[in-house]
Amino acid sequence: MRFSLAALALANAVTVLAAPQVDPGRFSCGAPEPSAEHVAISQAFAKDEAMAIANGTVTKRAVTTIDVYFHVVASSTAASGGYLSDALLNAQLDALNAAYAPHQYQFVLKGIDRTVNAAWAVDGNGNELTMKKALRKGTYRSLNVYYLKDMGSNLGYCYFPTTATAGSTTYIRDGCTVLYSTVPGGTLANYNKGHTTTHEVGHWLGLYHTFQGGCTGSGDSVSDTPAQASASSGCPVGRDSCPSQAGVDPIHNYMDYSYDTCYEEFTPGQKARMDSYWAAYRAGK
């Protein structure tokens, strides 16, 4: 029943969201490039995962429940200032769960807070750590998502799991920062089904872009995502940017740059990678 009520409220709220100042024709993620050390860890996980499959020792895991804190950072209390409603945020949670449920991840909303601060509402002006020190909740296994009014040329970014001591800069910075109008019902054409958050949370769980590394080398270090020379745009069915490699581009994968309506999957290999990073860096924290 909550979903039906949220959907109704969403339909009434959508029209007042202001359009962001980004290129509406292309996804752009500001997640940092994985370090050489992080890539080496992913490659080591890949070997372990392949060995487990070969030896038949893959065990079925119980559903992993992740606590979620949504932080709305707006320039005003108006919807046009980025002040998201509960209905919009609940719809975002539903979208996140729909994408990850097939892979045994469940997101449970633990809190919503709203801050009106014109400086914090603009990404890239040096306020990230100050904002997160004030707003971050939970532990290193808790997902903090910050919805900002202005993300510049990006739709979002998130940080990869790593070793982080409570109180450290790495620990405080952890989480995802996302353009407010990409939630379900937002006004950013082609990217308003909530899957910018889905994409960024993939990074938070250890996944790289499907086009990481291009057509050569280890790519994204996941064996069942075909090699991809560059990010997709739109939903180019049949695109094959690495014709010398097996498979067409994984344009329907949440870790590409496709339209939200084009996204529909993570692969079994990506699930295994999320599980590996979760167990090594976030579980029990």
Image (tube, grey):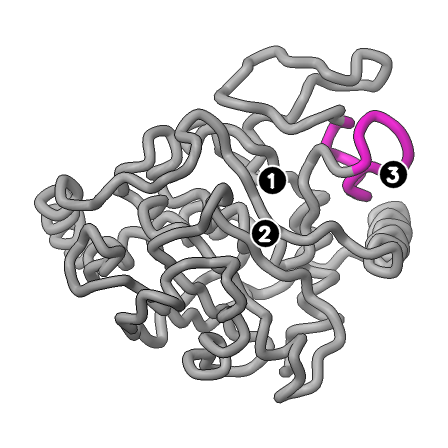
Q: Secondary structure at mark 3?
A: loop
> Tags 1 and 2 in contact by the CB under 8 Å rule?
yes
The residue indicated by pointer 3 is 218
The span shown in magenta is 213-227
The disc, 1 or 3, on the residue closer to the chain's N-terminal end is 3
Q: Amino acid at mark 3?
A: Ser
Q: Amino acid at mark 1?
A: Met
Task: Determine whether, in the image, residue 51 is placed left or right of residue 213.
Answer: right
Q: CA distance from mark 1 to mark 3?
A: 16 Å
- Residue 255: give its label: 1
Q: CA distance from mark 1 to mark 2?
A: 7 Å
Q: CA distance from mark 3 to mark 2?
A: 18 Å
Q: Secondary structure at mark 1?
A: loop
Q: Residue at x 23, y 56 (%)?
A: 81
User: Going by the picture, which residue comes out furthest to the bottom?
Assistant: 167
Considering only vertical position in the picture, is 256 above or below 232? below
